[in-house]
């Protein structure tokens, strides 16, 4: 089940986001890039998005929040599922929901794809449209901008 997050859900969104980044991203990125991701998804960023009404939570069968996605205009952001709940179709459910939300008002979805997620987005029909390299201390953060026509 996917529900809209409100301010009382801030710590759930933060926990899901930080846990996924801390447990998965070090396998793909150097320490400086992981720290950049953590600071990019800061408390103020999450609070601002919740306040704008564009953050959603995925609940498991017991009603526990195990995934999150942010949909801002035609951008799909902050799509994370707790590592111990991955492989159960919850990420697919969140992405389906996000794409349907975007498609209600836009023809195409845009997503910044991290290395761990890029393959998933390619399988879902997203196309690479840009590549970014951001200095992160002594390290670099690399990611692709991807787009998908929805209608």
Image (cartoon, rainbow, N blue to C red):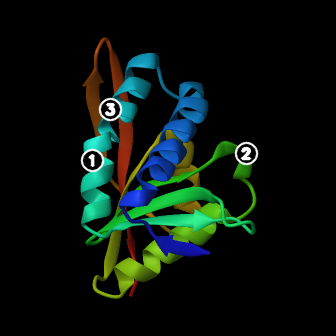
Q: Earlier in the sequence, mark 2 or mark 1?
A: 1
Mark pair 3, 1: CA separation: 9 Å
The numbered mark, 3 or 1, whose residue comes first in the sequence reads 3
The residue carrying mark 2 is: 84
Question: How far is disc 2 from disc 3 in space, using C-alphas?
Answer: 23 Å
In the figure, residue 50 lies in which quadrant?
bottom left
Residue in the foreground of this view, choosing between 100 and 53: 53
- Return the residue found at the far front: 8
Residue at 43% in and 66% down: 5
Q: Residue 108: image x %, image y %?
A: 33, 76
Residue 104: x and y in percent read: 35, 88
Q: Quadrant of the C terminus?
A: bottom left
- Would you name the residue on which mark 1 appears? 45
Look at the numbered discs 3 and 1 and tell me whether their residues touch, using CB distance below 8 Å.
no
Q: Residue at x 29, y 32 (%)?
A: 133
Residue 53 makes an appearance in the image = yes
- In this orientation, does residue 130 appear? no
Secondary structure under tag 1 reads: helix
Find numbered disc 2 in the image and state the secondary structure of the residue it sits on.
helix
Q: Position of residue 148 (x, y in %)?
A: 40, 71
Residue at the disc numbered 3? 39
What distance separates the C-alpha of mark 2 from that of mark 1? Answer: 25 Å
């Amino acid at each position: 089940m996917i529900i809209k997050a409100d301010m009382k859900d801030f710590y759930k969104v933060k926990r899901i986001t930080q846990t996924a980044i801390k447990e998965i991203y070090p396998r793909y990125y150097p320490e400086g890039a992981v720290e950049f991701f953590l600071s990019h998804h800061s408390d103020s960023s999450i609070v601002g998005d919740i306040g704008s009404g564009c953050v959603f939570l995925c609940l498991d069968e017991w009603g526990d929040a195990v995934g999150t996605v942010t949909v801002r205009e035609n951008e799909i952001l902050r799509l994370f599922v707790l590592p111990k709940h991955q492989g159960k179709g919850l990420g697919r459910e969140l992405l389906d929901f996000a794409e349907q939300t975007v498609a209600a008002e836009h023809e195409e979805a845009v997503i910044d794809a991290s290395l761990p997620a890029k393959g998933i987005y390619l399988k879902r029909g997203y196309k690479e449209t840009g590549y970014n390299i951001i200095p992160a201390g002594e390290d670099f953060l690399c990611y692709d901008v991807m787009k998908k026509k929805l209608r």
